[in-house]
Amino acid sequence: MPGIAKAARVSVGGLYGRFSSRDALLSAVHDRYRKKRDEHLSSRLDSSNIAVCLSIRIKAVVRAFIDLHSENAGVLRSFLITKWLNEAAPVSPEISHEIQVHRDCVVDFLVEALPGSEQKTKRKAIERATSYIISISKDQIVVTPDNPTERDALNTNLLANDLEKIARLIIDNCA
């Protein structure tokens, strides 16, 4: 908390006046991140603003997650580390539900681009591809780099191209 107060140019007492604990501060930051994430993805994945073509939608999803993870790497890293340190504490049902709803929205966005006859048969593949895009972009951008310099050196365009190709392969090769 003293380091945060110094960075925010407020007194430690002033910080504790606003947030009763480090966990309360993290909770407020997480709430702000979730709101920002929802707005970011909603604007990027608005069906009325994007072509119907699946490949264009895959690119939009990949780029949305890469941008989101890049812009919020520090915050996300803090949450992931906190979760790993508290591994015994289960994820709350509310957070689990929120994550599932979030994934379902992305999957629905991609499924909409398929012909009606393929939507049911390829949904599982699209779910796999979506989970892959989210986890790999998060791992490559948030978890793997040990410092901001390494994170800045990442070639996110190359990562985006690779994830687009892999997502397309997963979807095209499903039974």
Image: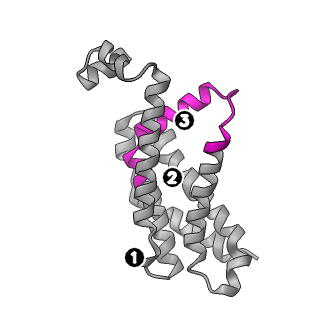
> In the figure, is residue 82 to the left or right of 141?
right
Is 74 contained in the magenta span? yes
Q: Amino acid at mark 2?
A: Ser
Residue 49, given in percent of the width and then of the height, sits at 39, 76
Q: First in sequence: mark 3 or mark 2?
A: 3
Q: Amino acid at mark 3?
A: Leu
Residue at 59 percent across and 50 percent down: it is 98
- In the image, 121 versus 41, the foreground residue is 41
The residue that mark 1 highlights is 49
Q: Which residues are magenta?
A: 67-95
Give the CA separation, mark 3 to mark 2.
14 Å
The residue that mark 3 highlights is 80
Is 70 contained in the magenta span? yes
**Image quarter in which the C terminus is found:** bottom right
Identify the coloring: one colour
Give the mark toward the camera: 3 or 2.
3
Which secondary structure class fits the magenta region best?
helix
